[in-house]
Amino acid sequence: MRVPRVAEQGRRAAARRRGRERPQEGELNARGRRLKSTSLAGIVVLAGVLLIAGNLTWFTAHVDGVAIEVQGQSAVPPLSGLALASVALAGALSLARTVLRIVLAVLQVVLGAVSAAAVLPALTDPAGASASVVTEATGIDGDRSVRAVIDSVDITAWPTLALIVAALGAVLGLVVLVTARRWPTPGRRYANAPADAGADQAAPTASPTAEDEWDALSRGDDPTRPNG
C-alpha cells in the first residue's frame, strides 16, 4: 500500500523540479531570441547604410574649373554587391541551425572585412578612386594623365561612414560567432509538441495495476467501474 504513495511523492517532486526549471529555460530562450533579433536587425541596417552610401557623392574632383561628382559605387564598385550579400546572409541566418550559423557568422566577418578593405584605398587616394569618372567626363585616359588634370578633390563624410559601417559589420559577425549557440533553434518547440502530446494521450490509457485496484477498494471505489 505504501509503494504507490512513494511513487506519487516522487512524481510530485519531479514535477516541482520541472516547474522550477521551466522559468529558467524560458528566460534563456528569451535572451537567445533577443540576441538573434538584434544581430539580424544590425546586419540588415548596416548593409542598408552601405547601399545608401554607395549611391551618394563621395568625392568632387575639380578639373579645369569643372566640378565632377563621384558616387560611392563608382569609387568602390564591389560595395553594393557586398552589402546585398550581407542582406541575403541575414535571411539565411534567421533559418539556420547552430553549425550553419557559425559558418555564416564567419562569412559575415569576411564580408565586413572585405568591404572595409575596399573602402579604405578610395578614402586614402580619392584622386585614384575618381579616375574612372574623370575619364568618362573628359576622355583623358591613363592614371598619370588623369591625375595631372585633377586640380583638387573634395571628400564628403560618406566614405568615412562607409568604412566605419563596414568595420562594424565585421565586428557584428564576431558577435554572432560567439552567441550563435544561444540562439533558439527554428521549429524546436514544434518538434517537441507531438512528443508531449503523445505522452499526455498515453497516460490515461495505461492499464490499472493490482496495487491500484487495492487502493481503489480501500477508498471505497469500485475498480471495475470505468472512469468518467
Image: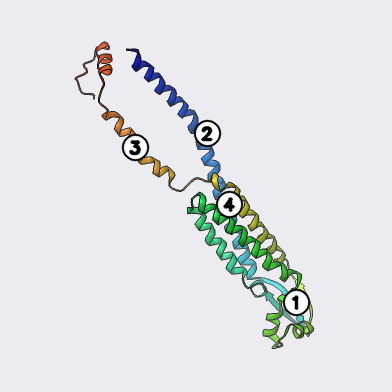
Q: Secondary structure at mark 2?
A: helix
Mark 2 lies on residue: 24
Residue at 28 percent across and 17 percent down: it is 211
> Tags 2 and 3 in contact by the CB under 8 Å rule?
no
Within-10-Å neighbours for mark 2: few <14, some 14–19, many 20+:
few
Mark 4 / mark 1, whichever is N-terminal: 4
Instruction: Decide: is 91 above or below 69.
Output: above
> Tags 4 and 2 in contact by the CB under 8 Å rule?
no
Residue closest to the far left: 224
Residue at 32 percent across and 37 percent down: it is 198
Mark 4 lies on residue: 39
Q: Secondary structure at mark 1?
A: helix
Q: CA distance from mark 4 to mark 1?
A: 36 Å
Mark 1 / mark 3, whichever is N-terminal: 1
Mark 3 lies on residue: 197
User: What x and y, as percent, mark residue 85?
Assistant: 55, 64
Question: Label for residue 127?
Answer: 1
User: What x and y, as percent, mark residue 12?
Assistant: 41, 22
Mark 2 / mark 3, whichever is N-terminal: 2
Within-10-Å neighbours for mark 1: few <14, some 14–19, many 20+:
many
Q: CA distance from mark 2 to mark 3?
A: 22 Å
User: What x and y, as percent, mark residue 44?
Assistant: 57, 58
Mark 4 / mark 3, whichever is N-terminal: 4
Instruction: Decide: is 92 above or below 195.
Output: below
Say left or right for 33 vs 174: left
Mark 1 / mark 2, whichever is N-terminal: 2
Quadrant holding the N terminus: top left
Instruction: Decide: is 107 above or below 223.
Output: below
Residue at 72 percent across and 73 percent down: it is 59
Tell me how the rendering is colored: rainbow
Say left or right for 44 vs 155: left
